[in-house]
Image (cartoon, rainbow, N blue to C red):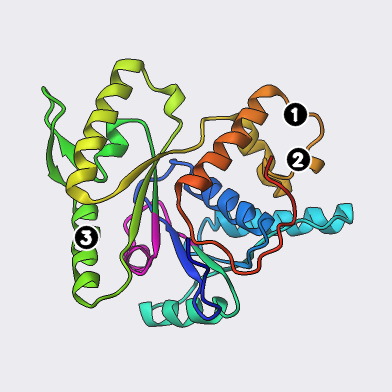
Amino acid sequence: MNALPDSSPHRITFANEKGGTGKSTTAVHVAVALAYQGARVAAIDLDPRQRTMDRYFENRAETTANRGIDLPTAQCAVFRGDTTEEFDAMAAEMGKGMDFLIVDTPGRDDVFARHAATEADTLVTPMNDSFVDFDLIGQVDAETFKVRRLSFYAELIWETRKMRAIQKRKEIDWVVVRNRSGHTEARNMQRIEKALGELSKRAGFRVAKGLSERVIYRELFPSGLTLLDKGHLGELGTSHLVARQEMRSLLASLHLPAIAKAEPRLELA
């Protein structure tokens, strides 16, 4: 992979118009994983009402101060502007000197979320393994489960990719991440897998395995810790070690650029 140019952070947008997909949790863990690898990471939370990602990093900063420890993290801020031009200005300012700029969008249709998605280098769409979530990107036949059409959201990304190709801009790498797949009935999981495989060829996204449903993700939020902070979590059970491996696999599947002259803080083992 090519190293990142000093002047241009790689933009990763986490977007899904449906809530409850583990979007913010995934975004925070990816940000922290990159920081552990020595990357300089900035983050923008586009949901000023819930600001889940921003609160997570606030809690993380409070924990480091209270415990007197040093944890890799991201510089996070909440966007509260009124125009996409204001967002672009904020993104440009926060991206100065950074390797990655991560944007976490609201779990609803939102003009800024759509704009952030179309400006991404890597677009990550977490979804639960259900046809309720699948409907965000495509509709299937009720009898055969074959894909009938792309959704409005998938059409938006498809048109954006065509426009960027015409403008000779960098192509968006769209990755649909299947979270909580372990809680799906086997036959339904196979149907979703098949439908996603068919739709991915039509819409131009890749499919990656994401994070399983685990209570620890909710338990870690008040402290701002992640599963990667292994020296500060106490004794971890087997399921938590498996979860950390899931995170490593997800990060690898995103195919993010290498970091120029980065010095890893710690191994993500």
Q: Position of residue 219 (x, y in %)?
A: 67, 36
Picture disc at residue 246: none
The answer for how far apart the CA atoms under marks 1 and 2 are is 8 Å
At 57% across and 80% down in the image, what residue appears?
Answer: 96
Quadrant assignment for the C terminus: top right
Q: Residues within 10 Å of mark 3 (few under 14, many from 20)?
A: some
Judge whether 6 appears above or below 201 on screen.
Answer: below
**How far is disc 3 from disc 1 in space, using C-alphas?**
42 Å
Q: Earlier in the sequence, mark 1 or mark 2?
A: 2
Q: Say whether disc 3 or disc 1 marks the residue closer to the N-terminus.
A: 3
Q: Position of residue 245 (x, y in %)?
A: 60, 35
Q: Are marks 1 and 2 in contact (CB under 8 Å)?
A: yes
The question of residue 114 being in magenta is answered with yes
- The disc placed on residue 156 is 3
Local SS, label 3: helix
The residue where tag 1 is placed is 236
Choose the circle earlier in sequence order: 3 or 2: 3
Task: Please give the label number shown on residue 230.
Answer: 2
